[in-house]
Amino acid sequence: MVAGTKAETVIAIIQKISLKQRNLVTEITLDMAGNMGLIAKKCFPNATRVTDRFHVQKLATEALQEIRIKYRWQAIDQENEAIEKAKKNKKSFQPKVLNNGDTLKQLLARSRYFLYKNKSKWSENQKERANLLFELHPDIQKAYNLTQDLRNIFEKTTDKIIGLTKLAKWHEKVNQSGFKSFNTISRTIMNHYQTILNYFDNRSTNASAESFNAKIKAFRSQFRGVRNVEFFLFRLTSRSLKRAIFNFHKNRNIIFRIEGEQIIKPKNNLLLDLIESELKIVPNSCQKCIMNITSHTFEEVQS
């Protein structure tokens, strides 16, 4: 493990691996942070750098949400002004209710989540809300279409040259839209277009690493933070092992047995190779605990 993401620190640690081994790395997926690019360039000179498509799409989604939030603040200001005016005239204020039961302020607040999704994944309530939102705010519909167009480029394009052409056309659409919030992603694509286009070679992403990182953060939040790093690694590894053991046993019907701290390998040793590899990253003081846990898990699965 490396504490932090400071380029100099990470580079110094990775360079402890021999250059011969590092030269075997042919491709690296990364975000658009400058320190990550520097680390990849210095430590893995032969590797092709690929900008993760999901980080590019995230910028487009954030630009869309910025437009929605702008209109929401406008709706809040209008409602506050209407309330103040009603008070001066000594009248009760009743906000206008739309066909789906939302007020305009509620519509803009509750539209957040379905704007992240493709239309095909909308529920009936979300479809109704989207129709109202797009009717009242055509700019949001235009911005939503831009985000979906970008998503479709990554999902449906397999050729690098075609990908370049489509991204250029998308860039032109952004310029014509006049949305200031989309200027950031437009400039980002222009500045990183070479590494973004490398995605179309092997369609590599950071999805698995991001998913694992999210699981670690969720696991950490259960304990309200981490005081003892070694114990946290032990808990994290043992939890991963339990899942891996159950899935391997269920799907491959592996027969095995463990005696104390001694692993006796069966003919199919995929599972036990996994256990041994996991044990290497756990402090020695915790390895015996993990062996006990895995033994207990085996008994549960078999029973």
Image (cartoon, helix red, strand yellow):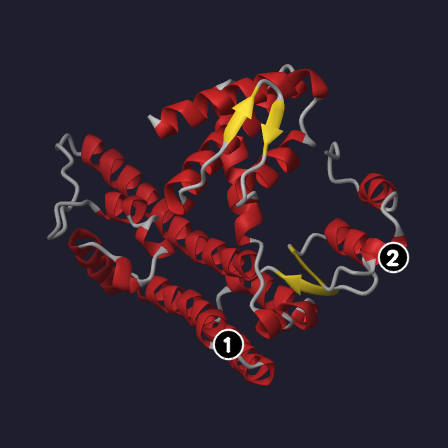
* Towards the viewer: 139 or 272: 272
Q: Amino acid at mark 2?
A: Lys
**Residue at 22% over, 53% down:** 126
- List x then y, in percent, for residue 301: 37, 29
Quarter of the picture holding the N terminus: top right
Q: Secondary structure at mark 1?
A: helix
Quarter of the picture holding the C terminus: top left
- List x then y, in percent, for residue 162: 55, 84
Q: In the rendered structure, find residue 170 and report the number of the disc placed on it.
A: 1
* Towards the viewer: 92 or 101: 101
Would residue 36 appear left or right of 53 to someone viewing this image?
right
Which residue carries the number 2 mark?
Answer: 20
**Residue at 56% over, 61% down:** 56
Give the mark count.
2
In this rendering, is residue 297 above or below 23? Answer: above
Whether residue 102 is visible here, answered yes or no, is: yes
Badge 2, how many Cα within 10 Å: few under 14, some, many 20+? few
- List x then y, in percent, for residue 48: 73, 66
- List x then y, in percent, for residue 70: 41, 51
Q: Earlier in the sequence, mark 2 or mark 1?
A: 2
